[in-house]
Image (spheres, helix red, strand yellow):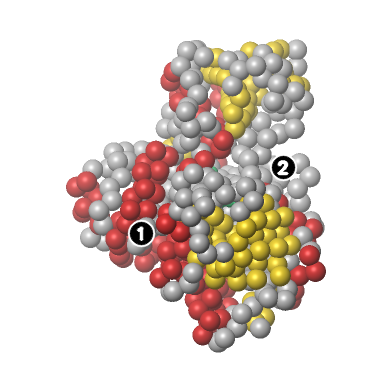
């Protein structure tokens, strides 16, 4: 849809966000006969895969987990590699568009700045930065968890003479790294990926590390058409398992035993097998108690550490990248996947600066000052992550009943029912938002299972003649309590991670995403089968 071509201003639903979640929801709601418009700030479909175009950007969910289960989409789509790149993902979204005709109902380059609930008509009024206005019965935010880049408040930030870019706002025209002196701030998933590319071509790459990334071997490989044709016979079953299974990946199933109680030889074999299978297998498919039991967790860490240290020549450097004592329990920060990350630190043109020893003092026009030393750069990369989960919501002036702002309502912590609805914000229903599995769930799985729940919920309202749905305070209290008990059950709160909102100074530390996909899906089923308990209808 081109700007200015919209003829309708009143919709049944307006979705905001054209990533996996928004695209799936639009596709399904249209099928059900709803009049839907999708708005996105970007110029193309893809969500994070549109924005994160930095060198090396790629998924860490192996194929065919990371794609839609819609037969007309997967049937004639082939990936070149087991872990596709951002470029492949862009091509995939174009394919999705060709098959499903999504763009005809999307208004691109439309950044929504406000969403105001009209209590008398039970409708939402949305306004975009360019003045575009639209109203709808349902406001369906599909903002993803990464809609707001996090840029640390370091003195002098923005003063660099050379290019300085956050990975999620990488210029589409690219940034030349070849032969340059490149500095990379941050060693999360994006940092690891960009460092791997920079180390191949830059004159020198300096890596600023605050916390070592407990990165896992990706075990990337080419994926031929023949490989995929063989597997496609099982795709319907694979997708069924993926969408109903315990981990949202069809093949990430841990051993039910405790790592600590399994005889050593057997335990090491299970660890080794998971390591060789690559990707998230070592994180999510070894033993079920690794994220719960301190002893089991330490065994996984020590295995990881031995693997990594075997690749590092300098013992001092090895201690910084894979320390004797874990910086946090293994797996409580999302492990990144790496291909050459640990090997590249053996190169002469790569330096690690340990910010735990001495923090950054300032950014200057020439580079980054740490203590007395000025590290000079031609290009500075901010791989500093996101104000995850809530950041995208905070950027929109969302007002519910009594003009209450969502950011105020959440100022003491996020409160939702099942991550879908918020008390006082009727007819606003989110996918992949805070307090749903989101970052613990494979993206397309989440889009489909939450999307189906939401479609069924809207159909329930339509069939019963309701025009308004609102989560109750009691249900939100219960869900907040449930999230707290999930937090206490796991080791997750022991890490200052973005899962906990702890990467952004001043943000309330709370578990932002539900870590148990199966438990979450059971709660959603229970809610739906009880006539959407915890929601009031009018
Ligand atoms: P997104 O893809 O984040 O899309 C949200 C959209 O909302 C964006 O296009 C944005 O422009 C739009 N938007 C937000 N605010 C506004 C506004 N105010 N107005 C208009 N538009 C707005 N997940 C996995 O499961 N496996 C992976 O391997 C994986 N890799 C990842 C790698 C990176 C670099 C990142 C950042 C995330 C990764 N994720 C991964 C998580 C990823 O976010 C999900 O897999 C999935 O893409 C989420 O889709 P979404 O539709 O919910 O949100």
Q: Is residue 151 visible?
A: yes
Q: Residue, x 71% and y 12% (percent of image)? A: 373
Q: Which image quarter: residue 421?
A: bottom right
Residue 84: x and y in percent read 38, 42
As measured in the structure, the alpha-carbon distance from the residue carrying label 1 to the one carrying label 2 is: 38 Å
Residue 504 badge: 2
Q: Residues within 10 Å of mark 1 (few under 14, many from 20)?
A: some
Q: Is residue 520 visible?
A: no
Who is closer to the viewer here, 78 or 298?
78
Describe residue 103's horizontal placement relative to residue 232 as left or right.
Answer: right
Residue 95: x and y in percent read 33, 50
Q: Nearer the viewer, mark 1 or mark 2?
A: 1
Mark 2 CB within 8 Å of ligand 1 = no
Q: Which image quarter: residue 514?
A: bottom right
- The vertical placement of 530 against 345, above or below, is below
Residue 379: x and y in percent read 57, 19
Determine the secondary structure under disc 2.
loop
Earlier along the polypeptide chain: callout 1 or callout 2?
1
Q: Residue, x 29% and y 60% (percent of image)? A: 72
Q: Residue, x 59% and y 32% (percent of image)? A: 166
Who is closer to the viewer here, 425 or 267?
425
- The vertical placement of 144 against 239, above or below, is above
Residue 100 badge: 1
Determine the secondary structure under disc 1.
helix
- The vertical placement of 220 against 430, above or below, is above
Q: Residue, x 60% and y 83% (percent of image)? A: 466
In the picture, the quarter occupied by the C terminus is bottom right
């Amino acid at each position: 849809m081109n700007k200015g071509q919209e003829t309708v201003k009143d919709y049944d639903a307006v979705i905001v966000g054209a990533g996996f979640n928004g695209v799936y929801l639009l596709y399904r709601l249209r099928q059900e006969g709803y009049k839907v418009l999708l708005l996105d700030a970007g110029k193309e479909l893809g969500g994070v895969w549109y924005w994160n175009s930095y060198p090396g950007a790629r998924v860490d969910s192996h194929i065919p987990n990371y794609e839609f289960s819609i037969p007309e989409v997967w049937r004639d789509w082939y990936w070149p590699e087991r872990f596709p790149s951002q470029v492949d993902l862009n091509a995939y979204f174009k394919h999705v568009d060709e098959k499903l005709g999504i763009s005809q109902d999307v208004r691109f380059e439309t950044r929504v700045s406000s969403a105001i609930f009209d209590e008398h008509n039970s409708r939402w009024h949305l306004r975009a930065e360019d003045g575009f206005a639209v109203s709808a019965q349902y406001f369906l935010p599909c903002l993803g968890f990464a809609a707001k880049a996090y840029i640390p408040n370091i003195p002098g930030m923005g003063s660099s003479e050379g290019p300085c870019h956050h990975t999620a706002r990488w210029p589409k025209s690219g940034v030349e790294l070849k032969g340059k002196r490149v500095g990379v701030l941050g060693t999360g998933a994006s940092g690891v990926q960009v460092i791997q590319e920079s180390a191949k071509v830059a004159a020198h790459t300096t890596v600023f590390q605050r916390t070592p990334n407990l990165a896992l071997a990706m075990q990337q490989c080419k994926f031929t058409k023949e490989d995929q044709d063989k597997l496609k016979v099982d795709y319907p079953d694979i997708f069924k398992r993926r969408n109903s299974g315990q981990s949202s990946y069809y093949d990430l199933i841990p051993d039910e035993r405790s790592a600590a109680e399994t005889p050593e030889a057997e335990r090491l074999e299970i660890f080794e097998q998971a390591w060789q299978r690559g990707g998230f297998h070592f994180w999510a498919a070894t033993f079920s108690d690794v994220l719960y039991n301190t002893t089991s967790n330490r065994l996984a860490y020590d295995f990881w550490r031995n693997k990594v240290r075997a690749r590092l020549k300098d013992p001092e450097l090895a201690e910084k990248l894979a320390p004797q004592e874990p910086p946090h329990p293994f797996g409580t920060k999302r492990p990144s996947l790496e291909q050459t990350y640990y090997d590249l630190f053996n190169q002469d043109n790569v330096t690690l600066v340990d910010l735990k020893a001495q923090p950054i003092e300032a950014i200057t026009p020439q580079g980054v000052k740490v203590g007395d030393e000025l590290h000079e750069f031609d290009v500075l990369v901010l791989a500093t992550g996101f104000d995850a989960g809530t950041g995208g919501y905070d950027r929109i002036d969302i007002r519910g009943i009594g003009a209450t702002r969502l950011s105020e309502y959440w100022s003491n912590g996020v409160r939702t029912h099942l991550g879908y609805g918020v008390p006082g914000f009727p007819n606003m229903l989110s996918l992949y938002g805070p307090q749903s599995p989101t970052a613990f769930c494979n993206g397309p799985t989440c889009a489909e299972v939450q999307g189906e729940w939401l479609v069924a919920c809207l159909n329930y309202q339509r069939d019963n003649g309701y025009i308004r749905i609102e989560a109750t305070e009691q249900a939100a209290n219960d869900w907040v309590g449930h999230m707290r008990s999930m937090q206490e059950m796991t080791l997750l709160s022991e890490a200052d991670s973005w899962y906990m909102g702890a990467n952004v100074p001043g943000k309330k530390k709370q578990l932002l995403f539900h870590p148990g996909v199966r438990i979450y899906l059971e709660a959603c089923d229970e809610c739906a089968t009880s006539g959407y308990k915890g929601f009031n209808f009018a």
